[in-house]
């Protein structure tokens, strides 16, 4: 339907431009034809854009889950990627990079994904 | 003849020139104009309804796809815990359309007790479905699988409702049904996507936005020992400026909400009502424009259950005139059931400080204060520094 409307609009614009180029032709009719044609063309382009945007929408990006680890001794905190089986409060088998003591998982959260690249 | 000043206006010059003989372009304009008017008048509304129905049909395809993906995620996860493909598929088939029937309220006496019975039974039924699908799953994993299964049920329900109105509108040619669904489609799809994304959170066992209440409770409990006081609810004790603080949360790290109302009621009754204050922490729905993680305070039982737990808390508090202080963290539906956003995790730290101040305000040394972290405790343990249970 969009393509049909676009084709029809182009034809109307053609007739309008052709009419306006003739010296004896009524210019107001020609302008109206061009106006109708341009409106129809813009409508059809908008419809095509909407259809394409629905079909080729922005890519869904998975958020990155990170674990915030905290040293139980010096309270030093740092982030790293979440490992399956971890939960908040769990004492993990890692050592604090500062004091070497055991660490616990202080928080687990999702980092905002990179802005979805708009493909269309 | 028309007066010359009218003819001189630009609008009529072309018409008069056409009357003078140049009809070549005017008749084309009139035909186009008349065709457009006829089409728009006669078929305009039908075109509009057809466009709406196309949009709804596309949304239905997407909803079906989301349901299928959520089901596949559940199938994959259950298969890791002893479920063979066929039995899991059979469970998914049987659980679709799962429902609970609200108790009759014509006679409201006992409605809460009857509702609680129905909800307990529903939970047991879902647990049995999960047990069939994943017989080797431990208690924590079973809780997470149950939450995943509930996500599949909700997605399937959304699909069925939209399909119902779509087919009803098509059958009866009633464009009101179609219009209502089309206008709500963006919100419906937003909700459906939220539930679809939630299955990933429960599959991995990571905290969701709704886990902020239990997270605050865990920070308050610290490394104090906890014990189970009510069904799937643990309590721990701590001290804040000589006030004895009893912290209540659902038993983690599985996806449980527990019965915090029952726990609070038991604490109050065991002390003969000698509780100075109840502070409840929960996630709350934010309005558009409000920032995620905004903290607000108020009065009342901050708990989003269908009724029984909230009723128990309010009843016990009212019986002994115990004030209930609510602290909520604002988030939207998507954030509440998907992996916890960084802003919400940061808000939890601020809430802990607020709770400490509220415990002290209006109480004196030696008083007992109950602090309840309400919400789904998926991904949140019970004490800091706990080691995983042996398999």
Image: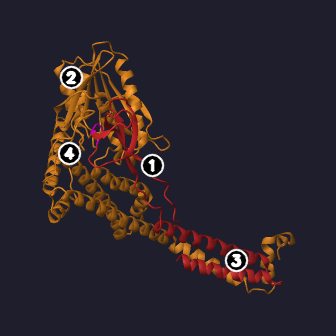
Chain colours: A red, B orange
Q: Which mark is residue A112?
A: 1
Q: Which residue is mark 2?
A: B268
Disc nearest the viewer among 2 and 4 = 4
Residue A107: x percent and y percent?
35, 39
Determine if the magenta segment contains residue A117.
no
Depth order, front residue of B336/B297 = B336
Spot the residue most to the top: B365
Label 3 – label 1 distance at C-alpha: 51 Å
Q: Which region shows up in magenta?
A: A87-91
Q: Residue at x 51, y 65 (%)?
A: A119
* Labelled pair 1, 4 in contact (Cβ < 8 Å): no
Give the CA separation, mark 3 to mark 2.
82 Å
Could you tell whether B24 is left or right of B330 in the image?
Answer: right
Subunit of label 1: A
Chain under callout 4: B
Question: What is the distance, in whole Å, between disc 2 and disc 4 at their CAs?
Answer: 29 Å
* Lower position in the chain sequence, tag 2 or tag 4: 4
Mark sitting on residue B140: 4
Q: Is residue B341 above or below residue B260?
A: below
Q: Mark 3 vs mark 1: give the one in front.
A: 1
- Check the residue under mark 2 and report the chain it is in: B
């Amino acid at each position: 339907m969009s393509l049909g409307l676009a084709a029809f609009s182009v034809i109307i614009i053609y007739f309008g431009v052709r009419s306006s180029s003739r010296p004896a032709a009524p210019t107001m009719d020609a302008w109206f034809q061009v106006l109708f044609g341009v409106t129809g063309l813009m409508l059809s382009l908008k419809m095509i854009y909407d259809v394409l945007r629905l079909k080729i929408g922005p890519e869904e990006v998975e958020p990155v889950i990170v674990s915030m680890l905290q040293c139980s001794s010096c309270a030093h905190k740092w982030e790293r990627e979440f490992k399956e089986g971890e939960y908040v409060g769990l004492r993990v088998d890692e050592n604090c990079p500062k004091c070497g003591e055991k660490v616990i998982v202080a928080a687990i959260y999702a980092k905002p994904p990179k802005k979805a690249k708009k493909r269309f | 003849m028309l007066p010359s000043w009218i003819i001189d206006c630009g609008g009529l010059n072309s018409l008069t020139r056409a009357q003078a003989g140049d009809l070549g372009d005017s008749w084309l304009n009139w035909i186009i104009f008349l065709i457009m008017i006829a089409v728009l008048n006669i078929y305009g509304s039908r075109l509009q309804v057809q466009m709406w129905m196309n949009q709804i049909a596309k949304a239905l395809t997407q909803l079906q796809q989301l349901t299928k993906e959520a089901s596949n995620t559940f199938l994959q996860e259950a298969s890791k815990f002893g479920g063979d493909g066929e039995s899991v598929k059979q469970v998914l088939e049987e659980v679709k359309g799962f429902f609970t029937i609200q108790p009759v309220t014509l006679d409201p006496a006992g409605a809460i007790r009857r509702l609680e019975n129905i909800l307990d039974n529903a939970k047991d039924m879902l647990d049995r479905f999960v047990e069939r699908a994943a017989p080797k799953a431990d208690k924590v994993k079973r809780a997470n699988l149950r939450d995943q299964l509930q996500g599949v049920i909700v997605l399937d329900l959304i699909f069925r409702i939209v399909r119902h109105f779509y087919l009803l509108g098509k059958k009866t040619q009633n464009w009101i049904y179609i219009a209502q669904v089309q206008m709500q489609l963006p919100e419906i799809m937003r909700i459906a996507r939220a539930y679809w994304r939630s299955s990933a959170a429960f599959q991995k066992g990571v905290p969701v936005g709704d886990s902020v209440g239990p997270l605050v409770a865990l920070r308050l409990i610290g490394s104090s020992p906890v014990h189970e006081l009510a069904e799937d609810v643990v309590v721990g004790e701590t001290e804040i400026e000589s006030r004895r603080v009893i912290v209540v949360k659902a038993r983690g790290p599985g996806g449980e909400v527990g019965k915090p109302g029952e726990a609070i009621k038991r604490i109050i009754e065991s002390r003969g009502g000698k509780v100075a204050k109840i502070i409840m922490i929960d996630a709350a729905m934010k309005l558009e424009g409000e920032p995620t993680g905004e903290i607000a305070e108020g009065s009342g039982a901050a708990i989003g259950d269908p009724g029984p737990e909230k009723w128990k808390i309010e009843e016990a508090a009212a019986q002994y005139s115990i004030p209930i202080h609510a602290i909520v963290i604002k988030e939207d539906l998507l954030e509440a059931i998907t992996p916890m956003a960084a802003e919400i995790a940061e808000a939890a730290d601020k809430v802990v400080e607020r709770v400490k101040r509220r415990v002290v305000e209006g109480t004196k040394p030696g008083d007992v204060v109950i602090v309840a972290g309400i919400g789904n405790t998926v991904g949140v343990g019970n004490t800091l520094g706990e080691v995983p249970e042996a398999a």
